[in-house]
Image (cartoon, helix red, strand yellow):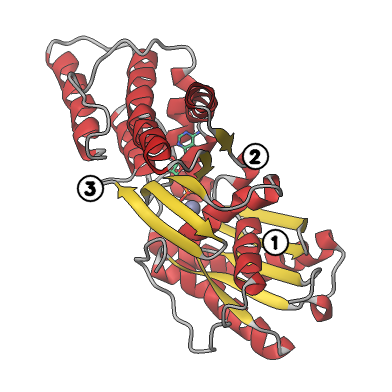
Amino acid sequence: MKKDSVILGIETSCDETSVAVMRGSELLSNIISSQIEIHRRFGGVVPEIASRNHLKAILPVIDEALSAAGIALGDVDAVAVTYGAGLVGALLVGVSAAKALSYALGKPLYAVNHIEAHIAANYISSPKLEPPFLAVVASGGHSGVARVDGLNKFTMIASTTDDAIGEAFDKVARALGLPYPGGPEIDKLARSGSAEIDFIPHRKRGAQLSYSGLKTAVVNYLHNFEQRGERPVLENVCASFQKTAVDMLLDIAFDAAVQTGVKKLALAGGVAANSYLRKKLEQDGQKYGCETYYPPMSLCTDNAAMICARARGMMAEGLPPAKLDLNAVSYLKIGD
Ligand code: KG4
Ligand code: ZN
């Protein structure tokens, strides 16, 4: 691989159409066209509507990313695209565009695992970060801790047994009557609340990671108030839920750091944008003598810069490009 290869990355796994251009380690552009406003009135992402809007957005967003980067299509050395995990119809728009570009330009196509890309976002904001480190995965579809032993070597060491943390934020927000996506809304309200409600009394540190039980505990708490004709203090519910959800994950992550001796942790996924999670990671990092990393907000939620960053790692170690029969995959785990 040329040291300063130009990679054009495409991300369409959910409700963001994003295209980015990287030259070597430099991010030249990262355009994100979000459909959040379109899906908000449905309270969540409607897959068919997402696909149609990706179709509308993909070509203009490619053009915008190229012009913002000051790059012509002919300058592109490789094309990278998310092929999973995500909504199949949405993924297919990005995969088809990427295949067409790769074929027309005669340049290699790299098939990127979305969750591994969330982890790789850290390489953009922290160029000195090198494996081994532990990735604290906190997204809408995945949660847990992964050991990263090389640019292309990932091993999941703890995973949620049911819901993902982002899913729990969104479901609890819905129960509270907050708009989609609920994570940022809970984050905002929690800032003026007190984490005084114990949703999981006697929670054992390091117990299995499970978010479904926590969500049910919050919903039951709300029902009890409703039955009494009272209203709970929303801010306190948000702060308490958020603290429990984050602490559960970080306890497991820091215990893993102590056990493995890998004392470097990096956040990955949309929930990495959460202000309490970022602050608590730093505090626990100091307490346990660990280095801590997290990407800037713009690289936490879905974006194509992270797709370029992941492809760089694949190209650096000579991983084979994808063939033109590449298909979209809805379920994909880290390391698949
Ligand atoms: O990683 P992501 O963009 O999508 C997947 O790859 O799954 O994550 C989206 C999730 C949503 O559940 C959203 O509510 C959550 O990230 N999220 C947040 C915050 N910003 C986004 N959760 C908590 N606090 C935030 N500030
Ligand atoms: Zn994501």
For label 1, the residue is 20
Q: Which residue type carries mark 3?
A: Thr
Q: Quadrant of residue 251?
A: top left
Query: Label 2: which residue?
Result: 296
Callout 2 amino acid: Pro
The C terminus: image quadrant: bottom left
Q: From mark 3 to mark 1, how far is it between C-alphas?
A: 34 Å
Q: Position of residue 313 (x, y in %)?
A: 62, 66
Amino acid type indicated by mark 1: Ala
86 to the left or right of 130: left
- Front one among 49 and 163: 163
Q: Does dot 3 land on a helix, a strand or a loop?
A: loop
For disc 2, the neighbor class at 10 Å (few under 14, some 14 to 19, many from 20) is: some
How far apart in space, not on screen, are marks 2 and 3 (Cα)? Answer: 28 Å
Contact, CB < 8 Å: mark 2 with mark 1?
A: no
* Residue located at (70% from left, 85% from top): 107
Q: Is residue 314 left or right of residue 223?
A: right
- Ranked by sequence position, the earlier of labels 3 and 1 is 1
Q: Residues within 10 Å of mark 1 (few under 14, many from 20)?
A: many
Q: Position of residue 190 (x, y in %)?
A: 44, 19
- Mark 2 vs mark 1, foreground winner is 2
Q: Which is nearer the eye, 63 or 197?
A: 197
What is the number of the mark on residue 161? Answer: 3
Work out whether residue 145 can be spotted: yes
What SS does tag 1 mark?
strand
Q: Position of residue 42 (x, y in %)?
A: 38, 47
Residue at 19% over, 32% down: 216
Q: Are marks 2 and 3 in contact (CB under 8 Å)?
A: no
Instruction: Give the answer, above or below, for where 292 lies relative to 13.
Output: above
